[in-house]
Amino acid sequence: MPLSNAIKHRQALFNMPDAKATLRTIITELVERTNTDARRLRVLEQRSESLTAQMNTVEETVLKTKKDVSEQLAGMASELEKQSDRLEKVEKAIDEIVKQLKKTASITQMKELEEFVEIYSPLKSNFITREQAETMIEEKLKRQGQYHG
């Protein structure tokens, strides 16, 4: 069939009343499918935009949380360093106290010292002066008959 016959045959098909109705039905169906596909595409685009917005929000939240945690860790590290310095100062103070305590008298030494104080206490003991001792010696010697003074 030559080309001109094919064209005539097509024209004859399109000129038929049933063929026009079928063609309109097909075109209508194609338009409806295109519209449906366009609606679906819009819905998918909206979902995609929504998910993108949600992901951006989550990402911002994660970054903010990460920053906050980093700041808190830095603060805790600083506080830990301060506490470590304070602990070191306390340990040095304790060492100094121990050194000072080693220099002080023990309980036994204090008791010995207390006993010596009691023995030589002028309020509790009866001490005599040199003159009184000489007088007592002279008297004793006189009694024994050995003093010639």
Image (cartoon, grey):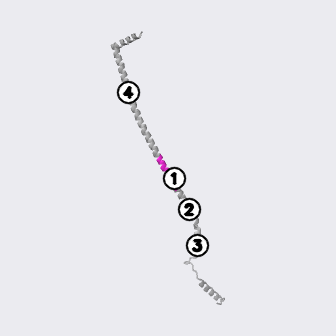
- The quadrant of the rendering that contains the N terminus is top left
Residue 82 against residue 30 in the figure, above or below: below
Residue 76: x %, y % from top left: 49, 50
Left or right: residue 132 versus residue 70 is right
**x 39%, y 28%: residue:** 41
Q: Nearer the viewer, mark 2 or mark 4?
A: 4
Q: Secondary structure at mark 4?
A: helix
Q: Nearer the viewer, mark 1 or mark 3?
A: 1
**Which one is earlier in the sequence, the residue at label 2 or at label 4?**
4
- Cα–Cα gap, marks 2 and 4: 86 Å
Q: Which residue is mark 1?
A: 81
Q: Mark 1 belongs to which amino acid?
A: Glu
Identify the mark at residue 38; answer none if there is no mark: 4
**Which one is earlier in the sequence, the residue at label 2 or at label 3?**
2
Q: Which residue is mark 2?
A: 96
Residue 142: x %, y % from top left: 64, 89
**Which one is earlier in the sequence, the residue at label 1 or at label 3?**
1
Q: Residue furthest front?
A: 4
- Cα–Cα gap, marks 4 and 3: 112 Å
Is 4 magenta? The answer is: no
Question: Which range of residues does the magenta coloring cover?
Answer: 70-85
Crowd class of label 2 (few under 14; some 14 to 19; many from 20; radius 10 Å)? few
**Which one is earlier in the sequence, the residue at label 1 or at label 4?**
4
- Cα–Cα gap, marks 2 and 1: 23 Å
Q: Nearer the viewer, mark 2 or mark 1?
A: 1
Crowd class of label 1 (few under 14; some 14 to 19; many from 20; radius 10 Å)? few
Q: Secondary structure at mark 3?
A: helix
Q: Mark 3 belongs to which amino acid?
A: Glu
**Which one is earlier in the sequence, the residue at label 2 or at label 1?**
1
Q: Which residue is mark 3?
A: 115
